[in-house]
């Protein structure tokens, strides 16, 4: 019996190895043209023009339903958005059915080998990427003052007297979206990542409608959740994550970086990003991420409030025997002191930050050594996926996650909250 189990495991390992190395060889060859593609010149004038564009496709769907004033159809739309389910009801309004049909197609330049390799990178480094979302990507979004205003007005920390639990759910849903899109199969036909992207587009459209109803000051803050804001968020989740992995001394090849960014280029298309805002490669994506930060970064009470809520959430997650200063040091390590100061992160001793950085790099270095053997790589991938799922479940106390609309949106319109 033991012999048969070992034989089956050996066959499975051999099959995976053959598939992986063939896929990787094809992806590496395809990454070369991407690396050599001419880069964009992301000027402030170009980025300014994108602050007045949103997502007309998703906005139109939401507007048509809300204009009819049919509360049952509005609640049906909300139910579809929040349900953690890939299926759609048979009796959808025509415009909603058309939206889901038309926005499920990958762009013609999407490459399955690059997508598969990029998703393998996520599975290998998923726990580190999850940490980077919390200690780098999200706070760097908060550093963009105009975008932080939108987040502040719609964030769940404004509900239930700023409950950390409700904010934790927001973080968990962000991690869940990334997990859906970047797990193997997430961007294939009927993949959960595609459906998640479609739903997030509708959530953005609902929030835009809500803010406009609340007399959002377009002259001061530009369009809510505009094209530049969307691009900045996507770069924070992709190119700036790769930058964070490099800071941690995670060693990725050029082809692996291109494959990871290729996945997020596809996600950008699915999320309604304008074609001329989708970077051509990893270097272009990093340049866009920093161009948007340079264009929008400014201190704001809203950004600092969001960062404080994030720190409160991080403190709650730490075991009692670990000092809360670790979170402060980690934020300063990942973002740098200038941005941390702008966001109101408490001060930390330089030597303490450097000591923490050394420990993080040591742990990731050990992981990198183990990752270079196939058997250990498969084991690490399995453990990483289980840890990701455990992290998300720990942050959210319910049995499963869905894409939740803040209660303030539905209550202010007089609609039932389906969540």
Image (cartoon, rainbow, N blue to C red):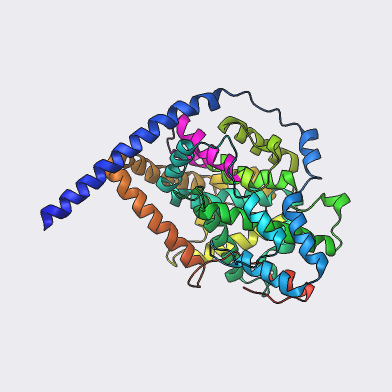
Q: Is residue 251 magenta?
A: yes
Residue 168: image location, x then y, percent: 57, 65
Magenta span: helix, strand or loop, mainly? helix
Asked if 67 appears above or below 161 in the picture, the reply is above
- Residue shown at the point (87%, 62%) measured from the top left: 215
Q: Foreground: 51 or 338?
A: 51
Instruction: Kindly tell me whether residue 297 is visible in this rendering.
Output: no
Residue 60, compared with residue 109, is above or below; it is below
Q: Is residue 334 left or right of residue 20?
A: right
Res. 311 visible in picture? yes
Q: Which residue is found at the position 67% from the left and 68% from the top? A: 78
The C terminus, quarter of image: bottom right
The quadrant of the rendering that contains the N terminus is bottom left
Q: Magenta segment range?
A: 242-267
Q: Quadrant of residue 267?
A: top right
Is residue 194 positioned above or below 316 on the image?
above
Name the side, left or right, on which 364 lies relative to 192: left
| Residue 50 placement (x, y as % from top left) | 77, 41
Query: How many numbered circles are shown?
Result: 0
> Is 158 a magenta residue?
no
In terms of image quadrants, where is residue 19? top left
Depth order, front residue of 40/74: 74
The x, y position of residue 220, in whole percent, is 86, 51
Residue 242 in the image: state x and y as whole percent.
52, 39
Q: Quadrant of residue 288?
A: top right
Q: Nearer the viewer, residue 157 or 363?
A: 157
The vertical placement of 294 against 411, above or below, is: above
Query: Which residue appears at 57% of the width and 39% of the height?
Result: 239
């Amino acid at each position: 019996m033991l012999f048969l189990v070992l034989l089956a495991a050996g066959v499975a390992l051999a099959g995976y190895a053959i598939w992986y190395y063939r896929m990787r060889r094809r992806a590496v060859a395809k990454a070369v043209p991407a690396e050599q593609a001419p880069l964009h010149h992301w000027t402030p004038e170009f980025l300014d023009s994108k602050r007045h564009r949103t997502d007309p496709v998703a906005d139109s769907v939401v507007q048509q339903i809300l204009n009819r004033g049919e509360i049952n159809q509005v609640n049906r739309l909300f139910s579809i958005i929040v349900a953690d389910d890939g299926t759609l009801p048979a009796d959808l309004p025509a415009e909603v059915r058309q939206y889901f049909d038309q926005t499920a197609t990958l762009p013609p330049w999407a490459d399955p080998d690059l997508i598969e390799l990029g998703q393998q990178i996520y599975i290998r480094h998923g726990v580190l990427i999850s940490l980077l979302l919390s200690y780098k990507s999200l706070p760097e979004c908060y550093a963009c003052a105009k975008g932080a205003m939108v987040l502040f007005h719609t964030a769940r920390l404004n509900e239930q007297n700023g409950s950390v639990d409700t904010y934790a759910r927001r973080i968990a849903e962000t991690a869940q979206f990334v997990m859906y899109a970047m797990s193997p199969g997430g961007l294939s036909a009927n993949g959960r990542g595609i459906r998640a992207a479609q739903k997030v587009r509708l959530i953005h459209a609902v929030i835009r409608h809500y803010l406009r109803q609340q007399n959002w000051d377009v002259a001061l803050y530009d369009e809510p959740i505009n094209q530049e804001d969307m691009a900045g968020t996507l770069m924070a989740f992709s190119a700036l994550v790769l930058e964070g992995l490099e800071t941690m001394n995670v060693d990725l090849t050029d082809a692996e970086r291109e494959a990871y960014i290729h996945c997020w280029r596809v996600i950008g298309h699915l999320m309604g990003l304008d074609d001329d805002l989708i970077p051509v490669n990893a270097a272009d994506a990093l340049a866009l991420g920093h161009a948007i930060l340079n264009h929008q970064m400014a201190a704001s009470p809203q950004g600092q409030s969001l960062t404080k809520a994030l720190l409160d959430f991080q403190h709650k997650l730490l075991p009692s025997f670990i000092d809360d200063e670790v979170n402060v040091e980690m934020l300063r390590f990942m973002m740098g002191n200038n941005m941390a100061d702008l966001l109101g992160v408490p001060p930390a001793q330089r030597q303490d930050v450097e000591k923490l950085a050394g420990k993080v790099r040591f742990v990731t270095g050990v992981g990198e050594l183990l990752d270079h053997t196939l058997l250990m790589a498969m084991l690490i991938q399995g453990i990483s996926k289980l840890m990701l799922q455990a992290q998300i479940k720990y942050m959210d106390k319910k049995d499963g996650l869905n894409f939740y609309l803040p209660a303030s949106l539905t209550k202010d319109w007089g609609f039932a909250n389906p969540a």
